[in-house]
Amino acid sequence: MVANRRGWIGWLVGGGAAASLASFAYPVLRFVIPPKVSEAPVNEVTAGKATDLLVNSARMIRFGSRPVLLIRISDSEYRAFDGMCTHLNCTVQYHQEGRQIWCACHNGFYDLNGKVVSGPPPRALAQYEVHLRGEDVIITKRS
Amino acid sequence: MEVSARVSAVKQWLDERLGLEPVREFLAHKTVPKHSSTIWYYFGGITLFLFGVQVATGMLLLLYYRPTSTEAYESVQFIVAEVQFGWLIRSIHSWSANLMMLTAFIHMFSVVFLHAYRRPREVTWLSGIALLGLTMAFGFSGYLLPWNTTSFFATRIGTDVAASMPFIGEALARFLRGGDDIGGATLTRFFGFHVAILPGITTALILVHLALVQRHGISTPLRVERQHRGAGAQVAQLPFVPNFLVRELMAWYGTLGVLGCLAALFPWELGDKADPFAPAPAGIRPEWYFLAPFYTLKLIPSHVWGIEGQVLGLLGFGLLAAWWVTLPFWAAARDGALRVRLVTGAGVALIAYLATFSFLGYTR
């Protein structure tokens, strides 16, 4: 009877201590997980004047919180790709000599359609729509 | 009253209040095995000393450093350009971090080659490996704090490697970044890890590690133990106080000299301020102790057997780490005999991998 009572008290004290620990740990755990911050969705940005960019050159454009690489392929053709490498998210750059997109971090190469040519990137770069509105270059998300 | 009499009176006064006699007694009888490999014993102490240097210089840097993405780079610039001896304090902090990593590796491999991890020191090994992991975490979190281009991309790659982990990867990456991408929230978070959370855990673990070293005593190498057992003789011992302690202090002094020379002659560069929208610069590479995994990730193709290369790489590193952490357990055969050749071979193979891939990662 006494042993039984002691057992119950042991369970109560142990359970109480465990519940106390859980009540301390839970808020701490929730605190360290960053909250989701909702950003206004960006679907279109103006990337400056068409004449500002020379043929066979590129510029990084802010598309909301992401970098987008705008390339002028010829006099009339522009292309835009997501600026983050699909391998480990380094920001890519345009390689003028090879006319390719290059990630300096792990030497990944993409062609001017965003497809992987060589190196470790597992997927193609996402492509954006580019069109001219008057003299302005407009980049929009592909639906 | 003579000086010696005064010292003796102070000693007695302290003894009555603090009970120092047992401590003195303990230190008077503490010994360290003396043999041809005794020199390797000093590296643990040197690593501890460098941790002390990190704490001291880190506290000084805290007086000026500002952990926000708009001010961090400028505050470090202010430290190195405007604050008197600021460049030296920052340079010592950076060099000391690198030397600490080097001595921690030397200490670990000396434990492997002297077979000091063997029974009953398995938990000492585990606590040491955890300390090595914490040292790397210090390096990774501290690297971002100047908010320069290299540190920005190193952190982006590092957290993206974490994101590749199955099941928990995304949540872990979000936890590390403090959001979806590297930004001000990441910097503040890494600052918190670097100056509060990691030092707290590390200090506690160092105490555990030292207590275990004290509990089991310093290990005598297997080779020396066998030689003496064969000859029926005891391994020679070196008194800890003053013989070993003075040698250890000399090693610390020598380390301080090397550190001072490196910091003064090769001040740590600050580089350019991080720009999240700028491309990663050509020739970008992480700190030397992350070069081997960095180069490995460069070599793995985009897909292997249908698995993404980075996931496969992470899996490989995970298995390698698990294999290394559990070394004391697979080092002993079922009958308790130590697989000396296997462990030595594993140690040599790991050093060869780290050295070769680090070299290739640096030069290519």
Image: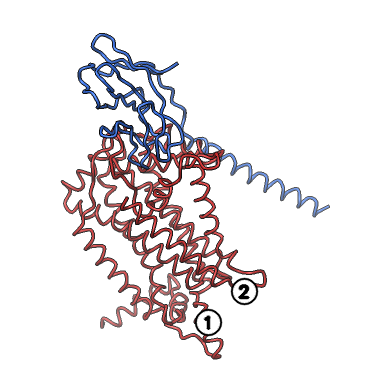
Chain colours: A blue, B red
Whole-percent x and y of residue B276? 31, 33
Give the residue at mark 1: B225
Q: Kindly tell me whether residue A74 is visible in this rendering.
A: yes
Instruction: Please state the chain letter of the residue tagged with numbered disc 2 in the rendered image.
Output: B
Task: Residue B288 in the image: state x and y as whole percent.
Answer: 34, 54
The percent position of residue B227, horizontal first and vertical second, equals: 52, 85
Image point (52%, 39%), residue name: A29
Q: Is residue B304 above or below residue B59?
A: above
Quarter occupied by residue B328 = bottom right
Residue B48 in view (yes/no):
no
Q: Hey, what amino acid is under mark 1?
A: Glu
Real-space CA distance between mark 1 and mark 2, rounded to the nearest whole angstrom: 14 Å
Determine if marks 1 and 2 fall on one subunit: yes
B293 or B213: nearer the viewer: B293
Residue drawn at the location 27% of the way across and 52% of the way down: B60
Foreground mark, 1 or 2, reads: 2
Q: Quadrant of the C terminus of chain A?
A: top left
Tell me the residue that label 2 is attached to. Answer: B337
x, y percentage for residue A132?
29, 12
Please state which amino acid type lies under the numbered disc 2. Answer: Ala
Q: Residues within 10 Å of mark 1 (few under 14, many from 20)?
A: some
Q: Earlier in the sequence, mark 1 or mark 2?
A: 1
- Count of numbered circles in the view: 2
Side of A21 where B313 appears, left or right: left
Q: Quadrant of residue B118?
A: bottom right
Residue drawn at 52 percent across, 65 percent down = B124
Crowd around label 2: few <14 · some 14–19 · many ≥20 (10 Å): few
Q: Secondary structure at mark 1?
A: helix
* Residue at the farthest top position: A134
Q: Secondary structure at mark 2?
A: loop
| Image marks 1 and 2: residues in contact by CB distance under 8 Å | no
Q: Please state the chain letter of the residue tagged with numbered disc 1 in the rendered image.
A: B
